[in-house]
Amino acid sequence: MAKTAIILKSILIAFVTLISLVSLSRCDSLLTKANSSGLTIDLIHRDSPQSPYYDPSLSPRQRLINAMRRSFKCIQRFNQSHFRQWPESDVIESRGQYLLKYTIGAPPVKTIGTMDTGSDLIWTQCQPCKTCFKQNFTFYRPYLSFTYRKVSCNDPFCKQTPRTFCNTRTQSNTCLYAVGYGDGSYSEGSLGTDTLVLKATGGTTTAVPNILFGCGYKNGWTHRGDGSGIVGLGRGKDSLIRQLGFLAQGKFSYCLTSQTTVYTKLSTLNFGDNAVVSGKGTVFTPLVRKEPDTFYFVSLYGIKVGNQRLVMYEPSWSFPNNTGNMIVDSGTTLTYLPRDFYAELKKALVSSVNLKTIKDPQGILDLCFYTRQNNIKIPAITFHFHGSPADVTFKQENMFFRISRDAYCLTVVPAKESFGVLGSLAQVNFLVGFDLEKEQVSFKPTDCGKFFGRI
């Protein structure tokens, strides 16, 4: 009986190994095929009907107001003291605005993750859960996946970030991770690798073997959510963009549709050749290396309102406080400016807009004008980023929002820190590219509702 059990176990192991090898071989061929032209996938706005967060009882205005409220919670993750305590950003429902679908494992398990340019680690909830939040689709079970592999304590992956560690009280030799966020949300579990499959715009699929990710057995969301975790696109070693290797070539870009079209038109996320941003209207600004290295820091040196040139610094390292003073982030709704820049912007708008200022009835935004008109004359706002030149001119849809019948408000607010954040509203209808090889961010005005891949 014992010999029979051993033989059956050996056959099972051999079968699983064979399936794994076939799966990995297939993944490699798919990955090689995808590399020839890059990859474009759809992004789902969290408030669109395709999202698990969609609430049909809310109006489009109320959804955006809720996103603005979440933005104030989200900005806490950039606090300098928060950096020292938790090396990763706050990437919970309150900050993430765009979701992407993928499958993980073999057989594949459908998953929805929050895209986040402000964090690195990919993680998803796993069974058996000790503590898990609600999700309305199947949980990933690593023990059922033929291609899953635990990461050991001796693996280089386990030593590359401060989020990972080993439990010396057990003999499992399994690498563990723990991430915590400023609002009390968290994820804890084990580190592993498995096959991740992305579905491209148009229907083709791309399988990527041996993706490093966190399998969360203890997870908590402060807010309601039906997603399963995070897909980090930060600059760190364990982010998706770093792990895609030659498929992404260190490049990704996205094109975010406006709030008025998120219900009918999807935003897009591009990798590799498809992520190249070029052509008329494209500007480039260099990335600045600062701690933590997760975030995409750039340098803002001036602002222009109409013909008024406001605060302006020479792009020189002699101004260290103004080098790398902005973070480009897709998960923050509002734009936050360093205090000196914001004060100048507010002053210029008040003097140039022939409307009475009022308080925001929602108590969210700092500068509002009293008007019930839709066609409002407001001068263009241009940000001068470090570059040659790197001037980005925003439309009213990027900078203003009608928060009530009487209040038309600026969606830029002062930052408590010495740096700011370029949020998702400001990035709407821009093709925004990140090139980790050239160390630069690019902006190109684009009708994102018509964007499908490379331009």
Image (cartoon, rainbow, N blue to C red):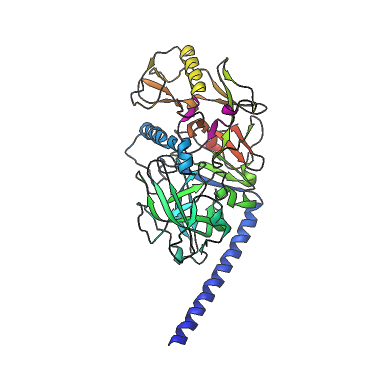
- For the point 37% across and 27% down, the residue is 364
The image shows residue 191 at horizontal and vertical percentages of 49, 58
Q: Name which residue lies at 39% across and 13% down.
A: 356
For residue 227, say whether it is visible: no
Residue 278's spot in the image, x, y percent? 66, 36
Residue 334 magenta-highlighted = yes
Along the horizontal axis of the image, is 191 left or right of 359? Answer: right
Residue 146 lies, with reference to residue 338, above or below; the image says below
Farthest front residue? 169
Nearest to the observer: residue 328 or residue 135: 328
How many circles with numbers are drawn on the protein? 0
Q: Nearer the viewer, residue 449 or 211?
A: 211
Q: Horizontal placement of 221 versus 301: left or right?
A: left
Q: Position of residue 23 (x, y in %)?
A: 56, 65
Give the position of the C terminus as an image quadrant: top right
Q: Specify whether residue 84 is in view.
A: yes
Q: Indicate the quadrant where residue 333 lies.
A: top left
**The residue positioned farthest toward the left in the image shown:** 57
Q: Which residues are magenta?
A: 320-338
Q: Is residue 110 above or below residue 435?
A: below
Q: Viewer-proximal residue, 399 or 58?
A: 399
- In the picture, the quarter occupied by the N terminus is bottom left
